[in-house]
Image (spheres, grey):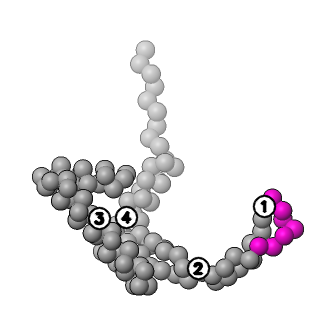
Amino acid sequence: MTKRDLVIRISNDTGLIQQDVMAVVQKTLDYITEAMIKGETVELRNFGVFEVKLRKPRVGRNPNDPGKDVQIPARAVVKFKPGKEMREQVLALTQKINNPPPATPPAA
């Protein structure tokens, strides 16, 4: 799903003009980004939590030249932890994939 798809769905469900919905969606994303830049945690109940984590510097390996070590510098990354409801719904999808319904025999 793209941002445009999201805007169209919200517009269709609410009857609001797509330009207005786009402005609200974009402003929401801008505010989340601003909070991340400040190092703040963004918690959206029933959806999930965005937070900035610092990765330590480490030594990596180049698969094309395994004899050489590559220094990977420390950096800040955004982590997302899904909320309980999202996690449960995605888990239900996994169970559907692992336990598909039995195939029906073809009609004769």
Which numbered disc, 3 or 4, marks the residue that appears first in the sequence?
3
The local crowd at label 4, few if under 14, some if 14 to 19, many if 20 or more residues have their Cα within 10 Å, is: some
x and y, in percent, of residue 90 in the image: 42, 59
Q: Is residue 67 magenta?
A: yes
Classify mark 4: helix, strand or loop.
helix
Other residues around mark 3 within 10 Å, as few (<14) / some (14–19) / many (≥20): some
Of mark 1 and mark 2, the one earlier in the sequence is: 1
Our reading of the magenta stretch's main secondary structure is: strand
**Residue under label 1:** 63
Provide the residue designation for mark 2. 75
Residue 86's mark? 4
Q: Which residues are magenta?
A: 64-70
Q: Position of residue 43 (x, y in %)?
A: 34, 78
The amino acid at mark 4 is Met
For the residues labelled 4 and 1, the Cα–Cα distance comes to 36 Å
Q: Which mark is residue 26?
A: 3
Measuring from the top left, give residue 19's x and y in whole percent: 20, 56
Residue 73: which disc? none
Name of the residue lying farthest toward the top? 108
Looking at the rendered image, the quarter that the C terminus falls into is top left
Please determine whether, in this image, residue 24 is positioned above or below residue 54.
above
User: For numbered disc 2, what is the local secondary structure?
Assistant: strand
Q: Distance between the Cα atoms at labels 4 and 2? A: 28 Å
Q: CA distance from mark 3 to mark 1?
A: 40 Å
37 vs 104, nearest the viewer: 37
Type of the residue with mark 2: Arg
Between disc 3 and disc 1, whose residue precedes?
Answer: 3
**In this view, the mark in front (3 or 4):** 3
Is 54 situated left or right of 35 in this image? Answer: right
